Structure formats: C-alpha cells, structure tokens
Image: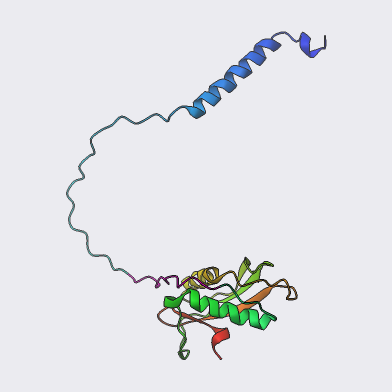
Amino acid sequence: MTTIDRIPGRDAARWGAKVALALMLAACGAPAPQAPSRPPAQPPAAAPAPEAVVTPAAPVARRGLPLPAPRAVSSHEALRRQAAERMVAANPDGTYMGEVPPQLLAIPVLEIELNQDGSIRHIRVLRKPSQAEDTIEVAIAAVRRAAPFGDVSRLPKPWKFVEVFLFDDDRRFKPRTLDD
C-alpha cells in the first residue's frame, strides 16, 4: 500500500469529484431555462420621426460571368496584366475602361502576394487614399473575386504584384496596369 492510499477521505474526495463532473456534464446538456411568456407590450404612440438623410452607399459590383481558368503566364508582367483583366471581368459594374478622368476620387495601392497555385496568400495596402477610404475594401473585394490568378510556380519568387486602382467619382475603378 502506498502513502497516497493511506490518506483518510481519499475515496470520498474521488467520489465528490465524480459527482461534480457528472453534474457539470448534465448542466451542459440541459435545455436553457425559458423566460415566462408575457404578451408583448404596446409601445406608446410616438410623433412621426423626421426623415433621415440617406447618403448613397458605394455601388455594389455584381459578380460577372464565371471567369475562365487563368492562362499560364511566363513573366511577372504577364501575371500582372492577366490579374488586371480578371479584376475587370469579375467586376463589370464596378469598373470603367475609358479615359481616366482628370480628377480621381481615390487611388489605393495594393500589393497582392500569391501562393504557388495562384490563390491569394496576402493583400497589403501600400497606399491609403486621403478621402473615400471605403475604396480600399472595394479594391480588396475586387481582387478576391478575380482570384485565382493561375499557377505561378514557374515564376521566380516572390510571387507578388502591385496594382494601383484609379477610382472615379462613381466609385468605379480602373486598374492602372490596363491604362496604356
């Protein structure tokens, strides 16, 4: 017999621990107590509220047709161009392809890092616009909708590219890569 077996009340402590554990487990499985049902209180009649001024939100770009599989690319420049084309195709209502207006709303700059299969590993904001900061999220969402960008394993590392987003006053963007 060991010293621990000679401790008085050891069996009682074991039994108490088992009971406590059983009670805790039973409490986890028991349904939550429900509040007594009362009829809903009638709110007092209030004076009509003044009409709120609604600021139009940024346009929600609908997703375009399913994108075809990305082409194989042989250079970082080809990757960047294909990524820009896919961003435009994936965001038809959120882009423009004409001449860039003389005054832009915002110009966020993103660095997109890819995994070997062309999926997005990380997006880093290199430049935040001084106004219309919501365009950063629009640009990030556009990149995510356009992914994947194709197998980049044959390109030298790092598998990164930088895209400049030229936003007009309607919050539509044009990738700088396509502004040739």
Question: Where does residue 80 sit, x and y in percent of width and height?
Answer: 62, 80
Task: Reply yes or no: does residue 27 show up in magenta.
Answer: no
Overall secondary structure of the magenta section: loop
| Spot occupied by residue 54 in the image (x, y as percentages of width and height) | 31, 68
- Is 60 a magenta residue? yes
Q: Give the range drawn in magenta.
A: 55-68
- Pinpoint residue 62: horizontal percent, then vertical percent: 42, 71
Left or right: 143, with 45 as reference point = right
Which quadrant: the N terminus? top right
Image quarter for residue 78? bottom right
Is residue 98 in sight in this rendering?
Answer: yes
Residue depicted at 65% across the width and 11% down the height: 12
The residue sitting at 69% across, 67% down in the picture is 116
Foreground pick, 25 / 40: 25
User: Which image quarter holds the C terminus?
Assistant: bottom right
In the image, residue 98 above or below residue 153: below
